[in-house]
Image (tube, grey):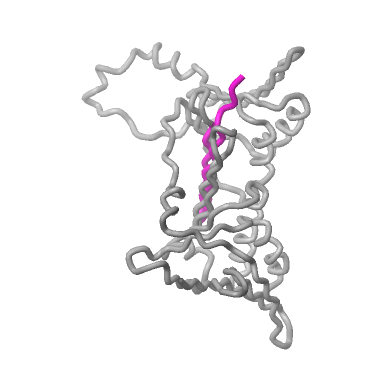
């Protein structure tokens, strides 16, 4: 197996570093899946233990000026590596003023992703970092398939993550859990409950994503306008770990264009961050009382 890539544009280098920095805040270890067109960073913890799942997708053409991969075989032209994002960040710390970064899969005393960073200088000067990785055998690849989109009860565009983070940071001193709820009328609520107090922050006038419209022939079968309004005002909610939610909010460094929250009543909260060249799905299972 072979992999080689090169980043030259300083904007792409900085953006790639921010993506890795975000992942380093969200996961200690994850799986890097490399294909011809894309890079994926995947985390799939055990849901029964309250674990989260992450699916981060990058279009390689938006980052790399040069990119080539020779995977396991012609039929399976992919590479799966277990990586530690924090180690990537250590290698990329000097990249903010670099001229270029070459990344390649190498074999030292152990498999490594080698970062060769060209520094600005009158003479050629390079800094090299060998980041150890673990190659995942093909028999385990199926464990890292893209998670299915949940059949959510409510979907809503989230408010400013910076504002929400400030609210949640205050709430996490009061409880280990937070209840998030939303309806189809653009309302989003975060709430903590204790034996002595209940505190909630309401966000209104948000947008709800539209995922298609009913066919005109079926219009006669639709509920009445009053029933539709009642359903729009009904809230779906789920109770999640407040520290993990705060960690998710604190880790955002890529300034997403949109952030969607999908709620499955008392089962899961699914956050979907969309950027021009990066998308991130973050699944948080509900915590029972």
Q: Say which of 273 and 212 sits in front.
A: 273
Query: Mostly what secondary structure, the magenta segment?
Result: strand
Instruction: Please name the residue shown 61% across and 55% down the image.
Output: 19
Residue 43: x and y in percent read 55, 47
Residue 57: x and y in percent read 49, 53
Residue at the left extreme?
217
Q: Is residue 281 magenta?
A: yes
Instruction: Please name the residue shown 78% across and 28% down the image.
Output: 173
Q: Say which of 74 and 166 sits in front.
A: 74
Q: Which residues are magenta?
A: 269-289
Q: Say which of 116 and 87 sits in front.
A: 87
Say which quarter of the image contains residue 229.
top left
Instruction: Please name the residue shown 59% across and 34% down the image.
Output: 49
Residue at the bottom extreme?
123
Q: Say which of 137 and 180 sits in front.
A: 137
**Up/down of 188 relative to 46, above or below:** above
Viewer can see residue 259 = no
**Up/down of 277 relative to 10, above or below:** above
Residue 227: x and y in percent read 39, 12
* Image mark count: 0
Instruction: Please name the residue shown 44% across and 34% down the image.
Output: 150
In what quadrant of the picture does the C terminus appear? top right
Viewer can see residue 145 = yes
Residue 54: x and y in percent read 54, 45
């Amino acid at each position: 197996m072979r992999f080689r890539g090169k980043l030259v544009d300083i904007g792409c280098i900085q953006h790639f570093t921010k993506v890795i920095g975000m992942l380093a805040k969200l996961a200690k270890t994850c799986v890097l899946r490399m294909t011809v067109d894309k890079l994926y960073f995947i985390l799939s913890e055990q849901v029964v233990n309250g674990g989260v799942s992450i699916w981060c997708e990058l279009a390689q053409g938006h980052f790399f000026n040069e990119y080539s991969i020779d995977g396991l075989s012609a039929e399976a032209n992919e590479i799966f590596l277990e990586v530690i994002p924090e180690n990537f960040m250590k290698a990329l710390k000097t990249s903010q003023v670099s001229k270029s970064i070459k990344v390649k899969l190498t074999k030292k005393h152990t498999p490594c992703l080698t970062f060769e960073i060209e520094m600005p200088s009158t003479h050629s000067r390079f800094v090299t970092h060998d980041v150890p990785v673990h190659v995942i055998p093909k028999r385990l690849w199926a464990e890292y398939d893209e998670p299915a989109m949940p059949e959510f009860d409510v979907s809503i565009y989230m408010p400013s993550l910076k504002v929400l983070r400030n609210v949640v940071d205050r709430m996490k001193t009061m409880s280990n859990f937070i209840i998030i709820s939303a309806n189809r009328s653009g309302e989003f609520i975060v709430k903590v409950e204790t034996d002595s107090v209940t505190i909630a922050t309401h966000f209104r006038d948000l947008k709800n994503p539209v995922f298609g419209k009913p066919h005109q022939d079926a219009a006669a079968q639709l509920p009445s306008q009053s029933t539709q309004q009642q359903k729009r005002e009904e809230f779906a909610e789920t109770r999640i770990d407040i520290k993990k939610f705060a960690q998710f909010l604190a880790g955002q460094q890529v300034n997403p264009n949109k952030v969607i929250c999908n709620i499955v009543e008392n089962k899961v909260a699914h956050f979907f961050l969309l950027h021009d060249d990066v998308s991130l799905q973050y699944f948080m299972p509900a915590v029972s009382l």
